[in-house]
Image (spheres, rainbow, N blue to C red):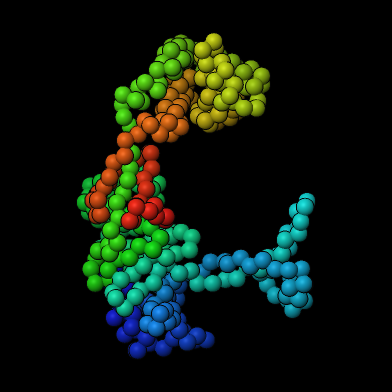
């Protein structure tokens, strides 16, 4: 994070004037880029720099009296919301959005209150020779470097970004916290045993979908949906062994696979063949069943700085045995 070096920011406070109307707000780089700032404050007797990018709205709850007093003065960003059981008074304050703090010990700490948007990630990427990305299959926000080229998600380094994480500003991206990334892989034997009770259902439903036209499938689906329009998954479980096709359609509705209801209403907008819907459903079903049975998974650990592959099963970042909040 050399772009946010403490000594560099400190020098800016000596040679640049703070922005007009403030005593503590300075530009990170070009003064005209006034969305990219840092604020000077004191923490535990030392000077630290809060790096900000853009603004956010901070919500404050008001009493009726406070709301009416603000309204009488013509104040903006105050709102009254009426619900069936209560009235809520809110005031929205526009504040700079802090994305991290630079400390004199030459490290940057990630401490954004909510998340890092695309602009925040782009700004931070400019401060290193890597990229900050939002990768849902790696648990959230990560910093990456090198790898398999544009559009590929294979990297020499892949580091999760979590709340409170500290990164050296003297090095490109040296993480100062010892962390472990914990992922999951499926125990094939346990997984196979779990799916045994669905084996006959899968085989029968797939055979029927291969032999059925799309028009007949949608006509059948319409009848079934009209019969069971409440808890689709519960209805599917009840019909799985006696009526596999009915169950397959109800499972697809419950897991929102194949857009069956949209195809019935607008058959020309989205078209998917019955066997295509079945194949997608089987993947979604297996994923749901695995997640409902944690005994299927074997934990896999990746050390600090070690690249780890994308996964649909999710990751946890651990520091000193405690789970961290990944952005």
- Residue 260 visible here: no
- Residue 188 visible here: yes
Q: Position of residue 128 (x, y in %)?
A: 28, 65
Residue 313 is drawn in which quadrant?
Answer: top left
- For image coordinates 51% across by 12% down, the residue present is 241
Q: Position of residue 98 (x, y in %)?
A: 45, 69
Q: Is residue 12 left or right of residue 35?
A: left
Q: Position of residue 198 (x, y in %)?
A: 44, 18
Q: Is residue 38 left or right of residue 235?
A: left
Residue 77 is drawn in which quadrant?
Answer: bottom right
Q: Give the mark count.
A: 0
Outermost residue, front side: 321
Q: As displayed, is residue 236 above or below residue 148?
A: above
Residue placed most toward the observer, 106 or 299: 299
Q: Is residue 20 left or right of residue 81?
A: left
- For image coordinates 52% across by 26% down, the residue present is 252
Residue 179 is drawn in which quadrant?
Answer: bottom left
- In the picture, the quarter occupied by the N terminus is bottom left
Q: As displayed, is residue 174 above or below residue 43?
A: above
- In the picture, the quarter occupied by the C terminus is bottom left
- For image coordinates 36% across by 57% down, the residue present is 161
Q: As displayed, is residue 285 above or below residue 239?
A: below
- For image coordinates 36% across by 67% down, the residue present is 109
């Amino acid at each position: 994070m050399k772009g946010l070096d403490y000594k560099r920011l400190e020098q800016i406070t000596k040679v640049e004037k703070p922005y007009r109307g403030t005593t503590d707000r300075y530009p990170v780089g070009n003064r005209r880029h006034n969305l990219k700032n840092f604020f000077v404050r004191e923490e535990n007797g030392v000077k630290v720099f809060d790096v900000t990018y853009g603004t956010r709205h901070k919500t404050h709850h008001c009493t009726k009296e406070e709301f009416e007093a603000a309204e009488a003065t013509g104040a903006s960003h105050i709102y009254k919301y009426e619900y069936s059981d209560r009235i809520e008074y809110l005031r929205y304050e526009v504040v700079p959005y802090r994305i991290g703090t630079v400390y004199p010990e030459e490290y940057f700490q990630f401490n954004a209150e909510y998340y890092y948007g695309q602009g925040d990630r782009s700004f931070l990427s400019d401060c290193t020779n890597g990229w900050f990305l939002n990768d849902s299959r790696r648990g959230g926000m990560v910093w990456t470097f090198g790898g398999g080229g544009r559009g590929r998600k294979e990297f020499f380094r892949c580091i999760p970004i979590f709340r409170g994480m500290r990164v050296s500003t003297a090095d490109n991206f040296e993480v100062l916290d010892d962390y472990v990334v914990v992922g999951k892989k499926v125990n094939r034997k346990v997984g196979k045993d779990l799916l045994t009770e669905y084996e006959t259902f899968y085989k029968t439903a797939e055979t029927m979908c291969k032999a059925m036209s799309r028009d007949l499938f949608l006509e059948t689906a319409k009848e079934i949906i009209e019969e069971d329009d409440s808890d689709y998954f519960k209805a599917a479980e009840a019909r799985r062994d006696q009526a596999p096709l009915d169950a397959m359609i109800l499972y697809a509705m419950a897991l929102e696979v194949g857009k069956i209801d949209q195809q019935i209403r607008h058959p020309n907008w989205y078209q998917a063949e019955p066997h295509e819907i079945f194949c997608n459903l089987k993947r979604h079903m297996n994923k749901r069943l695995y997640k409902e049975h944690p005994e299927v998974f074997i934990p896999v650990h990746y050390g600090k700085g070690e690249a780890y592959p994308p996964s649909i099963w999710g990751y946890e970042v651990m520091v000193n045995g405690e789970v961290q909040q990944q952005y």
